[in-house]
Each structure stands twice: as C-alpha cells, then as structure tokens.
Amino acid sequence: MVSVHHAVAHDPNNTAAWLDSGAFTPAEAGAIVRAIAYVEPLYEGRVELTGAPLLQHALGAAGILLGMNMDAATLTAAILHAVPACTEDWAEKLEAEFGSGVRVLVLGISRMEQIRQFSDMPTQQQGPSGSAQLENLRKMLLAMVEDIRVVLIKLALRTQTLRNLSGASAEQQTRIAQETQSIFAPLANRLGVWQLKWELEDLAVRYLEPERYKKVARLLDERRVDREQYIAAFLAVLQAELDKAGIAAQVTGRPKHIYSIINKMKRKQLDFDQLYDVRAVRILVDSVPDCYAALGVVQSLWPPIPGEFDDYIARPKSNNYRSLHTAVIGPRGLAVEVQIRTHEMHQSSELGVAAHWRYKEGAKSDAKFDEQIVWLRQILEWKSEVATQDDTQFKNELFGEQVYVFTPQGKVIDLPRGATPVDFAYTLHTDLGHRTRGAKVNGSIVPLNTKLQNGQRVEILTIKLGAPSRDWLNPSLGYLQSSRARARVRSWFNNQNIADSIAQGRALLDKELHRLGVGDINQERLAQRLDYHKLDDFFAALGRNLVTQRRIAQAIQSELPGKTISVPVQARTGSTRVSKAQITVGGVNNLMTKNAQCCKPEQTDVIVGYITRDRGITIHKQGCTFLSRLAETRPERVLTAQWASPKESAPR
C-alpha cells in the first residue's frame, strides 16, 4: 500500500534536512538550531518515560510537526518543551533567547501536563458519567491554553511517546494507551489532525488489545503481496479509464488503519474476510464536479455494492470531513473500497486544519491566515477564529463562556466564566451550597467571591447546618455568576417561615369570611380567581400582606353573585397618595403611585417603584427590606423612580 503521509516519516535526527527543505527563513532556521544547542546540555542523560533519550523524543515530535507544515516557533517550542523540568528561571531565559511567543508555547505545554495526574480517574469509568467526564477533560485541555498550537505540540509529543512505548513498563503502556484512546485521539480528530488521530488510535489499540491487534496485523501482512498486486492491476485499469474520460486524477492505494478495522469488526460483528475496505484505493481530482464524474467512471467499470455509498461532500461529517465513499465488486469478485475527493479535501483530511491553511495560502511559513477560516469545525459548540496578525494567528478563544475546574476527587466541573466557589458548591449540590462558609483553591483559602480559573482544584469548607447569605444575591459583591445557583438561593429565602405565613393567611381569610357573613365557599376557586394556582400559595400571600381586603371581597362577590358583599372602599389612610406629577417611574410621569408604609419614603430619599397586582405602583426607599424580598421573586416588577423637581411638579 502507498503511504500518504511521507512528511511525518522524517528522520528526527536529520535536522539538516529540515533546514534545507526551504520551509523556513534563515532567521527561523537559526532559531531551531539555537533551540537544539540550548537543550543538548540540559537533556544530556535524561530519558522520556519510554526510555528514549529526551533530545531524541523532542526532535521526533518536532519532525511530526514539520510533517504537518507547522511554523518554526511551534517546532522550536516542541524542542524546548522539557526545559521547565530541567532548570529554574526558565521562562525569563527562554523569552530572552527565543522571544515571548515561544515562551508562551512552552508555558502552555507545561500547564497541559497538569491533566495527567487526573487522567486515570475518568478513563476507568463506564457509561454516561464516564463519557461526560472525558468530554469535560478534553474541553479543559483546550480551554487551559491560550494558543492552539500548544495542543498540536502535545499531540505530537504523545504520538512520539507511543512510537517508543514498547520501552515503558506494562503498567505505563496500559495507562498511556487508555489516556490516548480516551482523550488525545478524540482531540486530534476534533481539531482536524486526522493523520495523528489515526496513528494515535492504531498505536493505542496495539497495547490495549494486543492479541486482536496482532491477529489483524498478521492477516494484513500475510495477504499484503497479493493485495498489492491486485490493487496495482485495479489502479492501472482505473487510471486508463479516467484518462480516457478526460478527468485529471491521481490514483493511489490507500492504507487501512488497524484500529478502524478492529472497530468495524466489533461494531458490525464481522470477520476479517467480510470487510469491504481491506482493499482500498483513493482518487484525487481538481474539482467537486470531477469527483462525481470519477464516481461515474468507477461504477461503470465495476458494479457497486448496495448500501455502501456515502456522500460526505453533500453531507460532510461533523468534523467537516468531505469525500465520496463507495465499494464495488472488482475483478475476481473481490470487494474494493474507493474514496474520491479533491486535492484540497485530501490536504484537510490527511494533515488537518494547519495543512489546509498552508494548502490554501502556499508553503511560506510566515503567511497570514484568513480570518474566516475556523479552527474547530463543529466541535460540539466550540469555536475559535484565527486572528490576522502573525503573533496571534493561533490564539485560542475556545470556551469563552465556560471555565473547567476539578473537585478534590478529580471530577471535572464546567461552570460559567466568572464563576466563584459558591457557584461551584451549588453546582455540586444545593445543600452543599447552603452550608458553604469558605473555600480552598489549589490548597489555599480564598474569598468566596474569587473568580475561578481553568484547571484549578476547588474544595468547599462547610458547616454542619447552615443557610445562604443575602449578600450572595447582591450582584455588586460578585458571589454568584450562575443563574441556577442564584435561583436556589432565592428559593431558600422564599421558603423560609412559609408555614407561619400559610397559617396566618388561613386565619386572615377565616376572619374576613366571618366579617362578610360568608359561611361556605370553595376556597380553591377563590384562590384561582386571585391568580393563585395552589391554595397554600394564596394563604402564604395573604399572610405576607400581598393581597388586599378589597380584592378578597371582590373575589368573594364574583364567586357568590347571589349574595351582597360589602366591598370596602380603597383606604386612603393606610398610605400616602402622591400626585401623579410628583414622581417619574421608568422615565414616565403621570402614573398612579403611592408611598409604601413599610419604609415611608420622603422626597429626600432615593426611591424605586414596584408594580403591584391591583394598586398601581408602590414607591419604596431604595434598600427597603420588604421590597428586597419582593424583588427576589419578581425582579421584573422593580422600576427606577425619582422625585420630580419643583418646576416639573408645579401645576400649570
């Protein structure tokens, strides 16, 4: 089979070939040479966990990145990635020697290493809970970095580790392979770096399912000569027919990845001999119309297998993968899979997003990337756009609305950006939120309104029995960012003393019914006439003086139309009537307003308005305790208000 990714196969020690490739300017090549010289004494005698020399490991990862057409700064950072573990004051030294851009990349790699201490926990979990944790871990990895190239460097380093994983212990092999299959291979796929994704998957399954891997690899190898001869003859016929049809096409054999074979055998419960795509070819053309024209040539030569056609050009995959897939019955009655795509689609599918950009804009390492090209294509709801300046072309803006933190047990929790330890506590459990009295972040006690950052470990300090603070509802104090947590705090205060309010409301209704001489009435229908769906809600409102005597009498009269009810006249003594022209509410004057008796505002006070159900707008002092309780459940009823100036209120 013909390899489609020659660039990755660079000899990692043949750096002269890198520098002579013409991919870098003299200044960029000089930075790479200086980086190698810088780390040689630092890495001397040090090995990677596989036992490979650390310098060889770093150069191998840089070679992978070179094969992805990454820029010189990315290769330089990959070479320098282990410097933080080798020397103190590394950040200042790297910035002085290689610039702030490279320093930021190395710092990002160092931060991503934090995830390894937590990775064992979720990879062992099964079911929806484990899947959700893995998803959050992947998101956290991306959210923790400011520059997306950090993730690509980490993927290259992981690929290099897997290439040498035979030198690690059995326990390390299993752990690294599980972590790769659960976290890093999906990340590579979602970032569009599919060639690394395929290699990561193949190498991981080699250690997780060694017997099955060896069996499939042996079957592939045993039939390799026959398959290659068969494919060569197939390609010759196909190329001749495409030429005859006037379609400029490049036709090659396509390597089949062992992981995908194993996955398909398990998913469809098939034997190796039942797979259609062990023999596979790929057709590369110049345009989309040529794709469909080539498909017509293929299907005119050999009969298609029913149900084995997929049009990923008309309907791309979620990661924007585009290609035509079909399977046909070739010579000797053997199945052959055929993939047809444009050269541009191939660049994108094989080498990922970075190669796609380079393909579109040329091979110059300092090219500016188009602002409209999106880094991540339909990665759930994650988006990051490329800036137009060279220094920021890889800046990561993923998860701008989210932050990801750890519990003490290593569980990943996603929170809104700006969330605090109080938000964190309520996300875990309402009761934990109510009992919160302090918090530790990364082992240090912090204020409860501290804004949490990606990757932090948060521990909540509680008391045995507790209640939330009203200060948590004050936006200016910054204790709560999550609307869900805020609603739970409001609910707690709303439910306090509700039993007393219900009992008081029931007594008030009995007293009013006795005063009106009403002995029997359907109280539930009475509550519904007053817009309360539950009787206890009606009693609680009565007990809190939220329903007037006049409204109760009017509702009773409607419920008992045959009985004459004495409806009280709107009292003038319980509140101070204010002239319509004296107060402006929400920027509007001439509204019916009255002063509240709970706080009795005067013209020297700062005031706000509250829309009542049947008494117009009540004017309260700003900060009125009773109004604060009302506003917790009906914040939309609170309006700005101000006293009119003497000139405005004077009669005309």
Image (cartoon, rainbow, N blue to C red):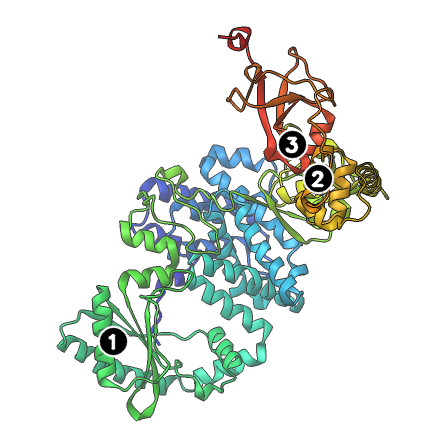
> What amino acid is found at the position of numbered circle 2 in the picture?
Arg
Residue 461 placement, left or right of 92? right
Q: Earlier in the sequence, mark 1 or mark 2?
A: 1
The residue identified by callout 1 is 295
Nearer the observer: mark 1 or 3; the answer is 3
Where residue 288 sits, quadrant-wise, is bottom left
Task: Indicate which disc residue 490 carries.
Answer: 2
**Mark 3 secondary-structure assignment:** loop
> Could you tell me residue 407's position as x and y percent?
70, 49
Task: Indicate which disc residue 257 carries.
Answer: none
Distance from the alpha carbon under mark 1 to that under mark 2: 63 Å
> Could you tell me residue 306's position as x and y percent?
35, 84
> Could you tell me residue 345's position as x and y percent?
31, 62
The residue identified by callout 3 is 478
Check the image and name the residue furthest to the right.
464
Can residue 479 be seen here?
no
Q: Is residue 368 above or below residue 351?
A: above
How many marks can you see? 3
